[in-house]
Image (cartoon, grey):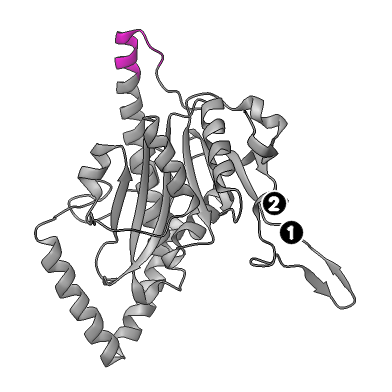
Amino acid sequence: MDNPEGLYELQPEASEVPSGLPLIAGLTGFADAGGAVSQSIDYLLETCDPVVVAAFDNDLLLDYRARRPTIYFDQDHLEGYRPPMLALYLAKDVVGQQFLLLAGYEPDFRWEGFNQAVLNLISRFEVKSTTWVHAIPMPVPHTRPIGITVSGNRSDLIETFSVWRPHTQVLANALHLVEYRLQESDHPTVGFVLLIPHYLADTEFPDAAIKSLESISTATGLIFALDDLQEESREFIEKLDRQVEGNHELSRLVSTLEDRHDSYMEGNPLRSPLIAEDGKLPTADEIAAELEIFLALQRNGDEDSGKAGPELS
């Protein structure tokens, strides 16, 4: 069934979706330490020119009483009602590469139906790969790079970036189920779990959004301009460091976490490929230039094999 239980409605723009795009997914409503998912999705929706290609039905998937929408009371009348949104978008990165974005609330109901709906959309648009993110609180310091745990079937990413590989049961969210089903069909899929300092779990931690988007870039080759987020991060860290310096208990906590983190990482020395040897992040223009070289090499290789290579749109 192309649309199980009528959970979504395809928009006219669905006919404009090219086949073979990567899919990025992020759903809010469960574990989102540091606001990693909500900040990342807000960034993508604000900066990547998204167009809705499939809209999911709130009345079938959402528990309104558990997550009530808001409405504006203007002195003597109501206005500005904005219903929740769960949708599949067609978007593009800073250099024009297109991708699909599944974003919105995590469904409260019909998980199996939602899972099948997502799988059918992936099949319909011949999605190349699926990447999703979420974040959990961990006893780690904000003075060290954010670590990630990687799941899925892309062993290259798991081997390179996963700093913590536990054997444990976890409370599942809807995208866990999607990843599980995609693994069964050998569809390339990867999930990034960001390990956020537990004392920042209830804040909007800009570094969490930056790490999330960097991870997506690593998995997909998409390029995002992070200058604004990096500036927010610098201001946030400066304020946080001042608070730590002025609070003996917090300072001691951070110091203890640093010692434990450094001891653990001695045997697991991973660093992001997006960071240069001097520790600086490249600019969006530098990353775009590297991407152009990569795509040129890919095109040449595909020409040799008789296949069409990826194009910037």
- In the image, residue 251 above or below residue 278: below
Is residue 223 something one can see in this rendering? no
- In the image, residue 41 above or below residue 66: above
At label 2, which amino acid type do we have?
Answer: Asn
Q: Which mark is residue 163?
A: none
Give 93 or 4, whichever is nearer the viewer: 4
- In the image, residue 85 above or below residue 233: above
Q: Quadrant of residue 54?
A: top right
Question: Disc 1 marks which residue?
Answer: 82
Q: Quick check: is 100 in the magenta stretch?
A: no
At label 1, which amino acid type do we have?
Answer: Arg
Is residue 102 shown left or right of residue 202? right
User: Is tag 2's residue or tag 1's residue first in the polypeptide sequence?
Assistant: 2
Residue at screen point 42% across, 51% down: 133
Give 277 or 76, whichever is nearer the viewer: 76
Residue at screen point 41% across, 14% down: 308
Residue extending furthest right? 76
Question: Disc 2 marks which residue?
Answer: 58
| Picture coordinates of residue 141, whole percent (x, y) | 26, 72
Q: Residues within 10 Å of mark 2 (few under 14, many from 20)?
A: some
| Picture coordinates of residue 257, whole percent (x, y) | 21, 75
Is residue 254 shown left or right of residue 54? left
User: Magenta part of the protein: which range?
Assistant: 299-308
Q: Give the number of the mark in front: 2 or 1.
A: 2
| Picture coordinates of residue 210, whole percent (x, y) | 39, 56
SS class, disc 1: loop
> Residues under labels 2 and 1: Cα distance?
12 Å
SS class, disc 2: helix
